[in-house]
Amino acid sequence: MRDVLDQLRHWWDQGAEVGLATVVATWSSAPRQPGASMLVGPDGSAAGSVSGGCVEGAVYELATEVRDGGTPVLQRYGVSDDDAFAVGLTCGGIIDLFVERVDRDSFPELSAVADDIRAGWPVAVATVVQAPPDLLGRRLVIGPDAVSGTLLADGSQRLVDALRDDARGLLAQGRTAVLHYGHDGERRVDDIAVFVASYAPRPRMIVFGAIDFASAVARIGSFLGYRVTVCDARPIFATRQRFPDADEVIVEWPHRYLAGTETDERTVICLLTHDPKFDVPLLEVALRMPLAYVGAMGSRRTNDDRLRRLRELGLTETELARLRAPIGLDIGARTPEETAVSVAAEIIAARWGGSGLPLRSADGPIHAAATAPEPAR
C-alpha cells in the first residue's frame, strides 16, 4: 500500500470508494513483492501495479467489481513458466492478491496509518484475507504500544492477542507476511489467514568516508529506500553540499559514531576510507554488531593488512568472515557511479540470498522460491 498511499489517502479524504488489490504472497518468478498494490478509483482511473503489467487488466476488472459492491476476494493468478506467455503472465510465477473495497467505513483508521507511515513511525496493518464471510476483510492496526480495529463481531481476545504479538514481531523485523490461525488464536491452524503489512521506518545505510565514491553510494542507497547517513571525522569533507542525497551528514570519528547511534539487523555499513586509523577501530565495533551488511573498500593488500590488525585485536574468524572486502561485486566497475552499482548489487544479493552470478548462467527460478503453495480457498 505504501506505493499508492498518497492517491489512496486523497480518495479516502474525499469520501470515495476505491478498489484495492494487494499482493499478499508470491512464488517462483512473480515480479512484485508482497505489499505491492493497485487502486481503481471512483472515476475508473488506476494507480500502482501488482504484476508489472502481466495481469493488470484482469485485476482492474475484479477491483472494479469489488469497489462497486462485490465481496472481498483472495484471488490467485499464475501458471508455470513454460506456459506463461500463452496466457499473458509472461514472467511466470504465482501471485495471490487480496481485493477489497476501501472507504471511510471499511478502513476508518487509514488517515492515522498514513500519518504514521509519513512520519516514520512503525505501524502494521493486519487484514483477514481468508476466513468465513463474517471475518473476511476485517483488520487490526497494530503499533508498538496500541491496537485499533476489530476482528470477530463477538470478539475473540485470544485471536487478537496472538495476532497482535505476531504482528509486532514482524514489525520489529520490518517483515511482511501471511499468518495462519484457528478461530481462537491457535497457531499452525489454517482456518484464518491474515496478511500483515509492516510499515517500519526505512532501514539505515551508514557510509563512512566522505570521498567521491561516498556521494555515489549515498545516492544509490537513497534510491534503494535506505535512510542514508554519511560520517567522516574531517569537517572540511563531511558537508551537506558534497552529499545532497544523504539524509544526514555527521562529523565524528567513525567508531565513536557507530557505537553511539541506533542500528538494527537491517542496517548496512559501507566503509570507504581505506585508512587504518579510521577502518580498524570502526570494524572492531561493526563486526561485533548484528548488522545486515558490513563492506569495506580497498585493495586486496589493504584488506589483508586490515584483517591482520583485527586479528591482533582479538576478532574471531567467524566475526571476520562477515566482512565483505573488497566491497562490491565484480562487474568491472571503474567510476564512482559504477562502483556504487557494484556495492548496491552486493547489498541486494546479501539481503535476498542471491548468488551474484549472471542469470543466464544460473539454473532454477529467477527469484528464491518459497515452499509450494496450497490452492487458494
Image (tube, rainbow, N blue to C red):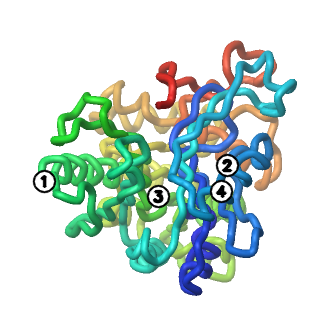
Mark 1 vs mark 4: give the one in front.
4
Most extreme residue toward the bottom, as rendered?
Answer: 14
Residue hosting label 3: 203
Residue hosting label 4: 65
Q: Residues within 10 Å of mark 1 (few under 14, many from 20)?
A: few
**For numbered disc 3, what is the local secondary structure?**
loop
Amino acid type for the residue under numbered disc 2 = Val
Q: Residue at x 27, y 34 (%)?
A: 314
Q: Position of residue 183 (x, y in %)?
A: 21, 40
Mark 4 vs mark 2: give the one in front.
4
Q: CA distance from mark 3 to mark 2?
A: 23 Å
Q: Mark on residue 50?
A: 2
Q: CA distance from mark 4 to mark 2?
A: 17 Å
Mark 2 vs mark 1: give the one in front.
1
Q: Tag 2 or tag 3, which sits nearer the N-term?
A: 2
Q: Tag 2 or tag 4, which sits nearer the N-term?
A: 2
Amino acid type for the residue under numbered disc 3 = Pro
Mark 3 vs mark 2: give the one in front.
2
Q: Residues within 10 Å of mark 2 (few under 14, many from 20)?
A: many
Question: CB atoms at circles 4 and 2 under 8 Å apart?
Answer: no
Q: Tag 4 or tag 1, which sits nearer the N-term?
A: 4
Q: Position of residue 114 (x, y in %)?
A: 47, 75
Q: Residues within 10 Å of mark 3 (few under 14, many from 20)?
A: some
Examine the image and state in which quarter residue 131 appears: top left
Q: Position of residue 179 (x, y in %)?
A: 34, 39
Q: Is residue 161 depicted above or below 239 in this figure?
A: above
Q: Mark on residue 157?
A: 1
Mark 3 vs mark 4: give the one in front.
4
In the rendered image, the quadrant that contains the N terminus is bottom right
Q: Residue at x 41, y 41 (%)?
A: 130
Q: CA distance from mark 3 to mark 4?
A: 37 Å
Q: Position of residue 299 (x, y in %)?
A: 65, 38
